[in-house]
Amino acid sequence: MAALYEGYTLCGLVPAQTLPNSGIQGVETERDSDHVIVTDSTRSVTLYKVSDQKPLSSWTVKQGQTLTCSAVYSSQSKEFVAVSDSKVIRIWKEEDILLDKAFKATVSADVWRVHCVPEGEPVVLFQRGAVRLLDSLLSAPQQPIEEVLAQEEAIRWSTNILAESKQFVIFTTEQKGDHFLYLQRLNPNTLQRYRLEREEPGLSPLSFSASYRDNHIRLLYLYPNGHVYQSVVSMRGLGADEGAQALPLPRNLLLGLPVGEGLLEAASALVLDEAHVAVVGVPHPSAGAGKDFLCIWNTNFQTLQAGKEMAGKIYGQLWGYSNKLFIPHGKTLSVIPYECPKSSLAAALGKLKQAKTEGELTQIWSTATPSRTVETRKTVCWITDNFIIRKHFQFLIQMAPVEEVQKEVEGLLSRADIQDLQASLGQLASTLVSRSLADPAFYTPSTLAQLVHTQSLCHSVCPDLVLLALEKKDYFLCQLCLQFFPDIPEAVTCACLKLHRNEVLRTPYSDTFLLPHLKDLSSQQVVLFLQYLQFLYLKYSQDASTQMHGLRSPSLTQIMDWVCLLLDAHFTVLVMTPEAKGLLLNLHCFVKSQVRLVSELGKIEGSLQELNKMKVKKDVGQYSIEVIELF
């Protein structure tokens, strides 16, 4: 289970009296995980050693000059890079004392940010969307800078990541209420533009966070209504420039955070790993009003795993490096160490025995009692709703007929605050499944499908749901679970394959009517199907015992017929599909070996026929060995 440990102060803050910000532009890593650079919103850059909680060096621009983006450190050149007054790029080393005497160059357009990944070259992002490598820019500082953004379009957030040995600059923009995502790849240079789906009218994202995992760039963003969305962009889909065309960018709702009576104003969500998100500026569901918390949520199970109250004003800023969170609050910049072990259902529900860390508050809905809930009705209405709903439906599902259960659940799912009730939906589904398994006459397929569609369930939350669908042969529900559950074990997946793909292979069909429908399959689906068919053929041809009577295994002839059908329907497409090249070569070699085998069998066909004609010798009832020579 995730944990937040005792924090400490890195430095004090001098927030501007008339502005809502903390006075800090950014916190960036330096040479290692124990050194960070803090840039304030006016004139200073300070290097800190985190474990010692003390500054090592500090640099300041002259009076009247202003640092307009946070400083970064280049591990290649061992230099710091910052921008003052939007156009003056400053570069210096740690031993330099005065910034004014260090290298500086004035460029021809306003700079938005300078980014630098470890072991990478610094990258300059201009306010109008153009991107330059620092060395290329400094070779001709006054070179013309193109305008990438449209009129009235402005950058709101940016970062850069290293993916597949390539640098990517990622930034979001806003134009007349619409929000866009730009992915700029360097060497070779390509630019992709995506349009984010609109939220409620008038709502814009409060924060963005990006990560790279499994050949995908993942964008996480938080809205004032507490909705945390994730959009995923495949690296394989990044090709040539799309120009000004904005591709639609689908999104998935990861979390519906409680926001209290109004909307969030200063809040931020930061990706920690594939299953955890740190959130600041969002009310704690079990704390009183007027208190600000730093929390860690598990996105797989939609549970609050750790929380720590932060004294003073929260500014909605959050940075994370090497298992440390940096958060400005009140008049201090604090460092909060954290830990996010690999998630499991037991840990997410707080059922693992482990020591609580100071300030940790686990979500209490799983152990709440009626008296606790009533005592804090006004401040924990979110928990109260979950508790009451669980108790109501637990009684209803155990006693009521199918029609009444379906009607009540449909009413629940139509509620406007359904995202705040995610904790109850998992237990609701589990109760439905338990009664369905115990009572063969009770089954609510449409209700279960609706619950799966909410994306509030996963296999760990309701492990018997897929098995129930298999038992009922509910192919639609199986398909939904396979589509929406990210954590289905391999054994259950194989069970689905045995029920679906083997049953299909044994089904009678007509080539004439089947071929047009096979052409509707995508190339990826065809490749996967062919791989599975190849696996079945090799398995059953090498070990006949696996084709036991009663298991409804397809015959070798049926398998080969399906291979031929798929190749007939998609051969032209497969030849042009890079992912299918290896499979087609394997099938080619496989077919050649089968042809060779049949050819050799043909050569001994006559001898085999003669064997069949031979008279069977009288059984003498004793053990004997008979040698037959074939010529």
Image: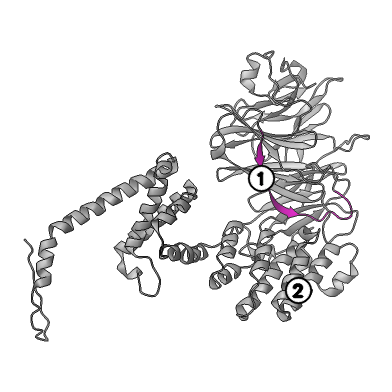
On the image, the x and y values in percent for residue 187 come to 55, 27
Residue 352 visible (yes or no) = no
The answer to whether 82 appears left or right of 480 in the picture is right
On the image, the x and y values in percent for residue 111 come to 74, 23
Q: In this view, does 249 lie above or below 64?
A: below
Residue sitting nearer the eye, 152 or 352: 152
Q: Residue furthest bottom?
A: 621
- Residue at image point 91% right, 53% down: 290
Residue 455 visible (yes or no) = yes
Q: Which amino acid does label 1 sit on?
A: Pro
Report how many numbered discs are placed on residues in the image.
Answer: 2
Asked if the residue under mark 1 is in contact with the one under mark 2, i.e. CB atoms within 8 Å, the reply is no
Q: Is residue 101 magenta?
A: no
Q: Is residue 277 above or below residue 168?
A: below
Q: Does the magenta stretch include residue 252?
A: yes
Q: What element carries label 2?
A: helix
Q: Is residue 294 above or below residue 104?
A: below
- Residue at image point 56% right, 72% down: 472
Q: Distance between the residues labelled 2 and 1?
A: 33 Å
On the image, the x and y values in percent for residue 538 come to 33, 59
> Residue under circle 2?
393
Circle on res. 250 = 1
Q: Give the range drawn in magenta.
A: 246-263
